[in-house]
């Protein structure tokens, strides 16, 4: 018997593995990509930023561990997905948010936003944004009170609100800082593009260095662990739509560079909208999804009652994903369009 006759042809059904990346490997690399942003947030906000990110991540990890054990399953925290949820959730929070609120939101993010739907791979909405949306609705005053970054005593003291007792009214320091988006929306004061890109502004812990967030996203794209189509579609749509509005009336509408670097757009476009569970499966679907999110961001920021709209835009995009997948289906090889014949 020849060597050729000894070989066996194996015929398998799809999906076929094209990459050696496992779920654990991808999630771990996302954590690595987020570390520079988290470290810079700690540098900008000091102990307040460190505690917010640490407590947010710990509350999410502990919630998933306890729910896994309560359901009679082994702990799933080892796949790193809940660590990403905790880090992203913490990066969306004000650094002076009372820690007990941070814990409540983390429990809600994992328990309702993820575990309720069946865990990793089953949640229709980004769990970190589900937790933040809950806090936005439950504690609107606390979620819209900010402290300035880069203060001289940020590593020696904490904001008075951080250690507020549960269910008590937090006391805020006399000095607070408006975010660039709120300063523009209500006072028409535009922050410098350089400050926005480097992160020396007030806001959530993840509204720090847009440049570091962009580099983290590019790292994942280069390693083929993220679809480039979604962030490009989001950022391109925001730039185009806001640019047209700015050309029409520069006194009323912000410049495209301001819209791109201000707020949580860069973090949302790179690390939240690209969630493989909540985004479409096809390339064209990702483009449609990204354009939808980009348009919603511009609409909410420009005409909505709140200065920021990234969170709601992504959650609405998550809700539209099943419909996008149904409307935009790849044609089966060897068949004609829908309604035709092979």
Image (tube, grey):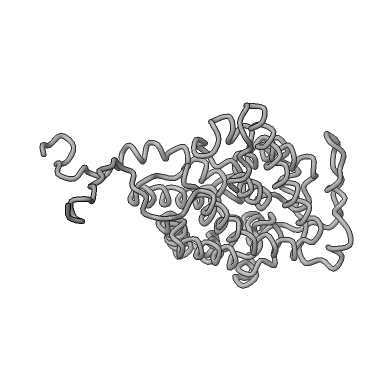
- Image position, residue 113 (x, y; %): 59, 35
Percent x, y for residue 302? Answer: 54, 52
Residue under the image location 54 percent in, 64 percent down: 214
Residue 106 quadrant: top right
262 on left or right of 51: left
Give the image location of residue 260, x and y in percent. 53, 62
Rendered position, 265 above or below 305: below
Is 287 located above or below residue 39 in the figure?
above
191 horizontally vs 279: left or right: right
Q: Position of residue 69 (x, y in %)?
A: 66, 31
Say how many tags the image has: 0
Does residue 103 show up? Answer: yes
Outermost residue on the top side: it is 71
Q: Can residue 256 be seen in this view?
A: no
User: Residue most toward the front?
Assistant: 1
Residue at the farthest left position: 341
Front residue of 45/148: it is: 45
Q: Quadrant of the C terminus?
A: top left
The residue sitting at 58% across, 61% down in the picture is: 33
Determine the image quadrant of residue 138: top right
* Closer to the camera in the image, 331 or 290: 331
């Amino acid at each position: 018997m020849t060597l050729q006759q000894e070989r066996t042809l194996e015929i398998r059904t799809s999906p076929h593995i094209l990459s050696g990346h496992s779920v654990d490997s991808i999630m771990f690399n996302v954590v690595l990509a987020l570390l520079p942003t988290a470290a810079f947030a700690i540098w900008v906000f000091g102990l307040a930023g460190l505690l917010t990110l640490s407590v947010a991540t710990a509350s999410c990890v502990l919630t998933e561990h306890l729910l896994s054990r309560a359901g009679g399953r082994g702990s799933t925290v080892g796949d790193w997905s809940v660590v990403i949820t905790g880090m992203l959730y913490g990066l969306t929070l004000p650094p002076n948010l009372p820690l007990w609120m941070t814990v409540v939101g983390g429990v809600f993010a994992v328990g309702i936003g993820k575990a309720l739907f069946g865990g990793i791979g089953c949640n229709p909405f980004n769990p970190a944004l589900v937790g933040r949306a809950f806090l936005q609705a439950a504690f609107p005053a606390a979620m819209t009170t900010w402290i300035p970054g880069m203060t001289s005593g940020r590593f020696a003291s904490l904001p008075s609100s951080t250690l507020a007792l549960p269910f008590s009214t937090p006391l805020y320091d006399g000095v607070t800082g408006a975010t660039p988006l709120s300063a523009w929306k209500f006072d028409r004061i535009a922050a410098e593009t350089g400050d926005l890109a480097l992160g020396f502004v007030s806001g959530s812990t993840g509204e720090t260095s847009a440049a570091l967030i962009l580099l983290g996203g590019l790292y994942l794209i280069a390693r083929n662990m993220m679809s480039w189509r979604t962030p490009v579609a989001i950022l391109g749509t925001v730039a185009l739509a806001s640019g047209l509005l700015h050309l029409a009336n520069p006194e009323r509408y912000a410049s495209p560079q301001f819209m791109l670097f201000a707020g949580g757009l860069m973090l949302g476009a790179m690390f939240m909208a690209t969630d493989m569970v909540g985004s479409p499966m096809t390339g064209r679907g990702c483009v449609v999804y990204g354009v939808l999110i980009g348009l919603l961001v511009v609409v909410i920021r420009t005409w909505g009652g709140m200065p920021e709209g990234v969170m709601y835009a992504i959650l609405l995009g998550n809700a539209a994903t099943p419909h996008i997948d149904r409307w935009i289906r790849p044609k089966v090889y060897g068949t004609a369009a829908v309604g035709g014949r092979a």
